[in-house]
Amino acid sequence: MTVPAAEAGDATTDRLKHTAAMAPMRTILITPPFTRTMGPNHPLLATTGETWTGMSRHPFSAGRILRRGPAVKILVIGGTRFAGRHFVGLAAGAGHDLTLFNRGVSGPTVLEAVEQVHGDRDGGLDRLRGRAFNAVVDMCGYFPRVVRQSVELLAGAAERYLFVSSISVYADGIAAGFDESAPVRTVEDPSAEEITGESYGGLKALCEREVERGFPGRVLIVRPGLIVGPLDRTDRFTYWVRRVARGGDVLAPGSPDRQVQFIDARDLAGWMLRMVEGGGTGVYNATGPQYRLTMGGVLETCRATSGSDATFEWVEEAFLLAEGVAPWSEFPLWIPESEPDVTLECDVRKAIAKGLTFRPLAETIADTLAWDRTRPVDTPMEAGMDPARERELLAKWRGRL
């Protein structure tokens, strides 16, 4: 099973505009994708020089980050939906010179006064011709043919290229605790352009190869695991946050001791920005946390953070599989132990050594829950189990004896 870590979410329709001053003498309108108490101290307001002035942290933001060194001229391909949106907010707030290239469909006004060039990266990159950048940050490359176009156009125009890949690039059969040297997937037909659970990782690996070919020695490849937190409309993590907060009897899959890994999009964005500022290159697994986290630990922290009365009924995997429960989609973070998949058990020491840090799990849960509660109450979940099916399975599980 592959675990896509692609960007997720659509533009919110309810936004507030804030004016921020960026050095030198540049005014930017920042349009955050959230609508709670955002006064003049909102941390997405930009900085002047190296200091932040009177900013208190807002629970949905990526936090505050001080620029290290001179401003970097950054081209972001994509970057208007989820992890990229957090990256753009941080980079703009730190005073970097940003150009966003996207289709203008998802969150087109996320940063209204940051330069945006609209076009399709598949055949529509001509508007970038003749431009020069210190760094390219590619948030949305899925097919090698398409990635090749941006690489060929920018190889002589950009100093470095950051490609957001996926932990799903790794081949089946590798051992738990694998690092960046582990073998990657292949695809039978490299020209196929359909994303499936079988093709996603192999296509990402081919995209990596295209970037490395065009930018030899100038590439930063980031392989995130499951990306979570506010703005994640895939609901692969939000499902558990919302479900536990609702309380009552919660059907929990498999063993509470099974290891899981994921990364808050804001931690990923902040680390990527630091790497761009420092001219970092290489290949890095980017997931977390730095300790062994279990499924039971996630659910217990969800309960403690929300203050709910949830109780957990741990149900054997064999029963769930016999009932046709779909791993990952109906129960996010659940990969049966019978499957040869260790993508939730990788080594991230290389990225940690380069400054990757992780906020407390309770903070990610609290912020995700607060963001989720800003959505309409009838917003359907894109992942997770239907409540009626959960009740049915619990009753069947309890009545099996």
Image: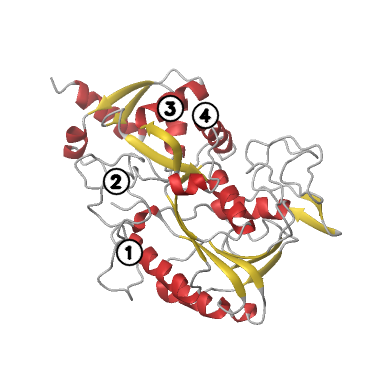
Nearer the camera: disc 3 or disc 1: 1
Residue corresponding to mark 3: 244
Q: Residue flagged by tag 3: what amino acid is it?
A: Val
Write down the quadrant of residue 143 in the picture. Answer: bottom left
**14 relative position to 254: left or right:** right
* Residue drawn at point x = 36 percent, y = 45 percent: 346
- Of mark 3 and mark 4, the one earlier in the sequence is 3
Write down the quadrant of residue 247 in the picture. Answer: top left
Viewer can see residue 246: no
Expressed as whole percent of the image width and height from the top left, the position of residue 242 reads: 47, 32
Residue corresponding to mark 2: 342
Q: Is residue 97 above or below residue 147?
A: above
Residue corresponding to mark 4: 362
- Of mark 2 and mark 1, the one earlier in the sequence is 1
What is the tally of numbered marks visible in this picture?
Answer: 4
Q: Residue flagged by tag 4: what amino acid is it?
A: Ala
Expressed as whole percent of the image width and height from the top left, the position of residue 123 reads: 51, 80
Q: Secondary structure at mark 4?
A: helix
**Alpha-carbon span between mark 3 and mark 1:** 35 Å
* Residue drawn at point x = 34 percent, y = 42 percent: 345
Residue corresponding to mark 1: 202
